[in-house]
Amino acid sequence: MTAYIMESRIMINKLTRRSTGRLTGALALLLALCLIAGGVMPAYATEPPPMPHQFYGTVSFDGDPVEEGTLVEAFVDDVKQAETTVDAQGRYGYNPIFRVSGTAGATVTFHVGGVEADEDATWESGKVQELNLTIHEGAAPPVQYELTISSTAGGSVTIPGQGVFPYHAGTVVELLAEAETGYGFVNWTANPTGTFGDASAEETTFTMPSQDVTVTAHFGLVYELDMAADPVGVGEAIDVAAKGAYAAGATVSIRAEPAADYGFVNWTADAPVTFQDATAEETTFAMPAQAVTVIAHFGVAYNLTMAADPVGDGDAIDVAAKGAYAAGATVRIRAVANPGYAFGNWTADAPVTFGGVTDAETTFLMPAQAVTVIAHFAEALPPPEVPTVTTLAATDISSYAATIHMSYTVGYFTPVEVRFACKRPTDPAWFYTVWVSRPADGNYTEVLTGLVSQTQYQFKAQLKYDGTVIEGAVYQFTTAAGSSSTNLNDLLAYFGCFIATAAYGTPTAEQIDVLREFRDVVLLRNTLGSLFIALYYRLSPPIADFIAGNEVVRTLVRELLVDPIVWFVEATGDTWQN
């Protein structure tokens, strides 16, 4: 009340200042009292709603007025509240008045032709403020795009209350399509693009895109539409627009209204027609290229009772809230569980087929009798505990080997599979250890062998459950410098194959497994082979280091040396394995 009195006094003070002497201060005060006590002021139980903040002023770009018709938009805390256009004098807010709704203290920003202005304001209820808007130097000038309107034969298009001139992107343009006698409106299209409020409505809006665009209204010869009820007298079939004739392809809105004690069943037609929803009382269809009779079918209504089991665990809802339906009508139902409970399934005390017996929202066809439909609920189970995997630091790092570790949990998905992914930072892809099944929470360790000395390696733990792979963080380690005095038995314990590993870039390549088997089965079982292995382990690490650091050499060694040896070993496998 106090705010309204103050606003009234401000208004009277303005009138007083603008008067030519005929209206004295006393008369102004008397007028204010009349406004307050005489019923002009609305009667509010509490404070009246806030009045808009009014803005006006000039609009310029780099010191020059912007073009007439430029769109000016006001945003309050980044939400658009009002828009207007610039007049022929480069002004806004004069005609029409530019009123912006908001909340006290909120920030008001302005966009001119889609470009944010330098100025902003603080919103105040009832304030009238002059604010000249400028687009900051260097910003792109507001761009306008050409809107061309056209129509097919049988009608025309107008833009109510607006001239035909370029528009800024985002401008909402009102459109009106008017059909000639014997023709009907079909729809709107835009080329190349654009957004209509309703492309099937004769009177609609179009949001201007950021490019030139042509909007076309389509018309066609009309065909008769007849509406009928079956049985007659138990309901009405209504042509919502009441036109009685439509062009082929036009969207026709229809509605069925059953009489007391009856219910709607469905729609049919005596010509090929596709209904948006043939079971809904209010729906649409596309007019065919011929006269058509559309029939609303009705029947005696039977009671529907919705129940929850157990009571209090949730709600069973008749979506349309009718409580009675004709036999054969499609009934939409929904189950909503209370916190801590979950929907299970639907049942009924009469023969009923549900669209989805375990779907919380579904449909069924009403039987020719009263029916109680029950939504069953149960205490909700906690969500399944998802497995976890954690990469742990590497240990026992030597020149050519390292031990890597992980910890993991299996959650509700026992067993799970675990493995490691490894690579050097310069390698394009990871190499992997084999998947290992694990039935319970725990730790897992792998020994990586055949590594290259003085080289950094990255590794991460991986876990697979129910077809999903999760990963731990990426850790790294660096192998130690090689030594020519390394004990042969220590090297053999790592089962390394240095040159082949360097050539293939991974110690898990299948070819390396072949060479390891040949070493263990053949070479290590005779004196000459053991001497060769001893010499190989003394000489190969520095050679392997050189190979690993040169992609061309790696390829040559792999294709010209290692691959032929592997082929020979595999080809003679039946001989040396036995």
Image (cartoon, grey):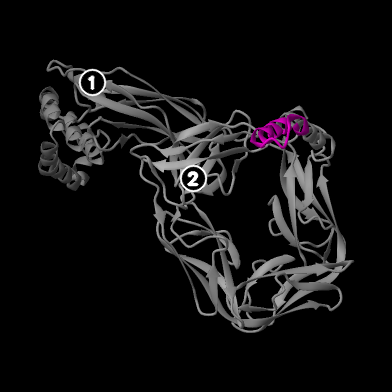
Q: Residue at (84%, 35%) from the top-left corner? A: 37
Label 1: few (<14), some (14–19) or many (≥20) C-alpha neighbours in 10 Å: some
Query: Which numbered circle lies on residue 32?
Result: none
Q: Check disc 2 and give the amino acid type.
A: Arg
| Residue 544 appears in the figure | yes
Query: Which numbered circle lies on residue 91?
Result: 2
Q: Quadrant of residue 319?
A: bottom right
Q: Answer with left or right where residue 238 lies relative to residue 415.
A: right
Q: Main secondary structure of the magenta part?
A: helix
Question: Residue 499 in magenta?
Answer: no
Q: Residue at (19%, 22%) from the top-left corner? A: 453
Q: Residue 212, how many percent across, how many down?
A: 40, 60
| Residue 202 sits above or below residue 22 on the image | below
Question: Which residue range is magenta in the image?
Answer: 8-28
Q: CA distance from mark 2 to mark 1?
A: 75 Å
Q: Residue 569, how many percent across, how many down?
A: 17, 43
- Identify residue for label 1: 479
Q: Check disc 1 and give the amino acid type.
A: Thr
| Residue 77 appears in the figure | no
Label 2: few (<14), some (14–19) or many (≥20) C-alpha neighbours in 10 Å: many
